[in-house]
Image (spheres, helix red, strand yellow):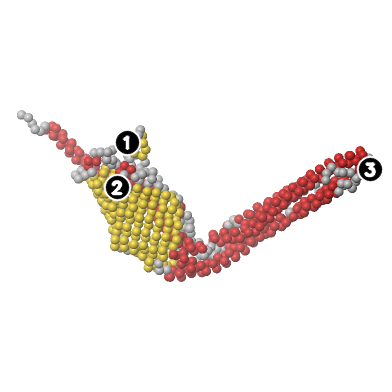
């Protein structure tokens, strides 16, 4: 009789099922959790923690609970914390070694939550001081790094004596250099005069002429000898005259150059005055840029932080690949080795999230969003990542809308966009400047913000427009007071609204911010006269102090240059003396009864 069931085979099958079930029940969730924490930590550069993971077969999916990602710039805070992540997978694609997520839900996303312990990884994490200081540099209100430093100058009149003790005066260096060159010219021309023909030489030539005049008394032989001597003497005198003329021409050019330099040296103290005035005082024109000093550092810090996170997320939307033997080779995000990609009829990337829904929890309320086509292989899928987030009637915020795309379909020509619109944001006690020079706080305001940003390749371009209504500003008290600061503080009560416009252009590592605001005009109108009076007083003191240091050397230099006039007179006298001797030589023509060999 045939048996329908082979009990030995059935028993073996049951044992395999039980072993697999036990492994799945006791170990697989822990393995998944460990892999996520390990590779997440490596990717972020700071600790990534997960409370639990639950991998299911029917239906095929994965659930993650309490995911915490440490901010690498601030190890005592989480950059993001997600209460629950649920993924539904496509099981048939798993057989093709492709992880395709049909839909992903991210619920309970919180940003910037505190940690009980540091999430720093040795050798990876950086100090969070830059963030805690609001992105400010050493100078108050300075836009640090690629933004350039724009700081709020002191409203006090600086101590001129201290400035001149520390500053190197360019005018003094110019005068010292000129004086050194004049002394060198004096030595050079005194030596040159020694080698040039002078009175003794031309007196000797005149005696020779007198001797040749008596040549006719000695007969025809002496006459011919006289003519030969006159020819030689003429050439000798002409050579001496040419040397003196050349020397005087060179001397005239050098004197003219030194006089030009002296004229510039006389102007240089005023240039030092202007340079130091611009450096140490707030000019009326400087008030036109005070908004950049107040707001630029905050904006620069946001751009730098956004750029840093973009670089961290870039490997998840684009990964390096090359070709070997005609086939594309991809380095996986996790693991070792390479995957060789052969041409597919309907290509799918190795990892893809078709649709993700997110719920972000903020103090103002909840923001929901949707992200489509998350994959590091957009060129395979042929579609970019697109996202939209929004929220209405939030606490202290009327509406929030963010949309954009990360388009890396063509890896050589990536194009990422972001468009943000915020309406009715209630600003409360925002410190615009917390330093000692000009502490300023935006106590209340209703803000509307619009931003359009484009990152094409390495080039970034963004336009930002923000309007503030129902504004209340206040300034803090400081030990230092001045008419300028008093005028600025008194103008705060007159400001009820203002507009801020900013343009960002450059690359992520080297960009500039062009920022202007109505505040510039208000502050310039309020304190312009006080600033002008203060700057004028400082300029007068600075001019007197600089001339006290430069005036003496400058007068000595001018006197030394005047000493070169004696050398010029000497050259002229020698030239006149030589011309007189040469003229008397030419005067011999016809007077002595014979024709000289020159006209």
Left or right of 30 on screen, residue 502: right
Q: Which mark is residue 84?
A: none
Any part of residue 113 in sight:
no
The residue that disc 2 covers is 373
Q: Name the front one of labels 1 and 3.
A: 3
- Looking at the image, is mark 2 or mark 3 earlier in the sequence? 3
Q: Quadrant of the C terminus?
A: top right
Q: CA distance from mark 2 to mark 1?
A: 22 Å
Task: Decide: is 117 above or below 283.
Answer: above
Q: Are marks 1 and 3 in contact (CB under 8 Å)?
A: no
At mark 3, the secondary structure is helix
Identify which residue is drawn at 77% across, 51% down. Answer: 571
Label 1 environment density (alpha carbons within 10 Å; few <14, some 14–19, many ≥20): some
How far from the left and from the top, in percent, is residue 25? 21, 43
How far from the left and from the top, in percent, is residue 549? 64, 59
Residue extending furthest left? Answer: 1
The residue that disc 1 covers is 340
Identify which residue is drawn at 66% across, 60% down. Answer: 551
Q: CA distance from mark 2 to mark 3?
A: 123 Å
Q: Along the line of sight, which residue is nearer the eye, 131 or 185?
A: 185
At mark 2, the secondary structure is strand
How far from the left and from the top, in percent, is residue 27? 24, 42
Q: Along the line of sight, which residue is nearer the eye, 590 or 3?
A: 590
Q: Quadrant of the N terminus?
A: top left
- Looking at the image, is mark 2 or mark 1 earlier in the sequence? 1
The residue that disc 3 covers is 217
């Amino acid at each position: 009789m045939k048996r329908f069931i082979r009990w030995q085979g059935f028993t073996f099958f049951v044992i395999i099922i039980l072993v697999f079930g036990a492994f799945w029940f006791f170990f697989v969730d822990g393995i998944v959790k460990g892999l996520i924490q390990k590779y997440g930590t490596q990717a972020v550069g700071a600790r990534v923690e997960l409370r639990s993971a639950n991998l299911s077969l029917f239906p095929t999916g994965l659930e993650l609970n309490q995911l915490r990602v440490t901010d690498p710039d601030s190890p005592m805070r989480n950059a993001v914390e997600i209460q629950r992540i649920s993924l539904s997978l496509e099981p048939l694609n798993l057989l093709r070694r492709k992880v395709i997520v049909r839909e992903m839900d991210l619920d309970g996303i919180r940003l910037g939550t505190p940690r009980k312990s540091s999430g720093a990884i040795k050798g990876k994490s950086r100090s969070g001081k830059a963030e805690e200081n609001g992105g400010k540099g050493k100078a108050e209100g300075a836009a640090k790094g690629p933004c350039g430093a724009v700081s709020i100058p002191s409203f006090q009149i600086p101590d001129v004596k201290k400035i001149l003790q520390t500053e190197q005066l360019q005018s003094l260096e110019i005068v010292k250099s000129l004086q050194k060159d004049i002394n060198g010219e004096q030595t050079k021309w005194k030596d040159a005069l020694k080698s040039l023909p002078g009175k003794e030489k031309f007196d000797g030539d005149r005696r020779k002429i007198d001797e040749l005049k008596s040549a006719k008394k000695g007969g025809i032989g002496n006459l011919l000898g006289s003519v030969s001597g006159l020819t030689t003497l003429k050439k000798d005198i002409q050579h001496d005259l040419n040397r003196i003329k050349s020397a005087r021409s060179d001397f005239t050019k050098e004197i003219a150059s030194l006089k030009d330099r002296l004229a510039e040296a006389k102007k240089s103290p005023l240039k030092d005055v202007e340079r130091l005035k611009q450096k140490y005082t707030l000019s009326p024109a400087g008030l036109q840029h005070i908004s950049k000093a107040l707001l630029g550092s905050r904006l620069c810090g946001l751009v730098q932080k956004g750029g840093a996170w973009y670089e961290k997320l870039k490997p998840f939307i684009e990964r390096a690949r090359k070709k070997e033997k005609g086939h594309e080779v991809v380095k996986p995000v996790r693991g070792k080795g390479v995957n060789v990609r052969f041409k597919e009829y309907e290509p799918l990337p190795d990892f893809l999230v078709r649709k993700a829904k997110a719920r972000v929890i903020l103090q103002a309320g909840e923001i929901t969003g949707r992200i489509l086509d998350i994959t590091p292989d957009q060129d395979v899928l042929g579609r970019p990542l697109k996202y939209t987030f929004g929220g209405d009637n939030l606490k202290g915020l009327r509406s929030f809308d963010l949309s954009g795309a990360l388009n890396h379909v063509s890896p050589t020509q990536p194009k990422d966009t972001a468009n943000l619109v915020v309406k009715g944001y209630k600003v409360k006690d925002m410190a615009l400047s917390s330093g000692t020079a000009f502490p300023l706080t935006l106590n209340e305001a209703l803000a509307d913000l619009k931003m359009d940003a484009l990152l094409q390749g390495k080039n970034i371009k963004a336009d930002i427009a923000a309007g503030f209504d129902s504004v209340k500003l206040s300034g803090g008290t400081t030990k230092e007071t001045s008419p300028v600061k008093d005028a600025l503080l008194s103008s705060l009560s007159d400001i009820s609204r203002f507009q801020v416009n900013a343009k960002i252009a450059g690359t992520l590592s080297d960009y500039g911010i062009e920022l202007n605001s109505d505040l510039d005009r208000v502050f310039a109108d309020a304190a312009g006269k006080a600033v002008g009076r203060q700057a004028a007083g400082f300029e007068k003191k600075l001019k007197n102090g600089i001339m006290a240091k430069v005036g003496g050397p400058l007068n000595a230099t001018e006197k030394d240059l005047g000493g070169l006039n004696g050398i010029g007179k000497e050259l002229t006298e020698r030239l006149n003396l030589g011309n007189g001797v040469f003229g008397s030589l030419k005067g011999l023509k016809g007077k002595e009864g014979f024709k000289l060999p020159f006209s």
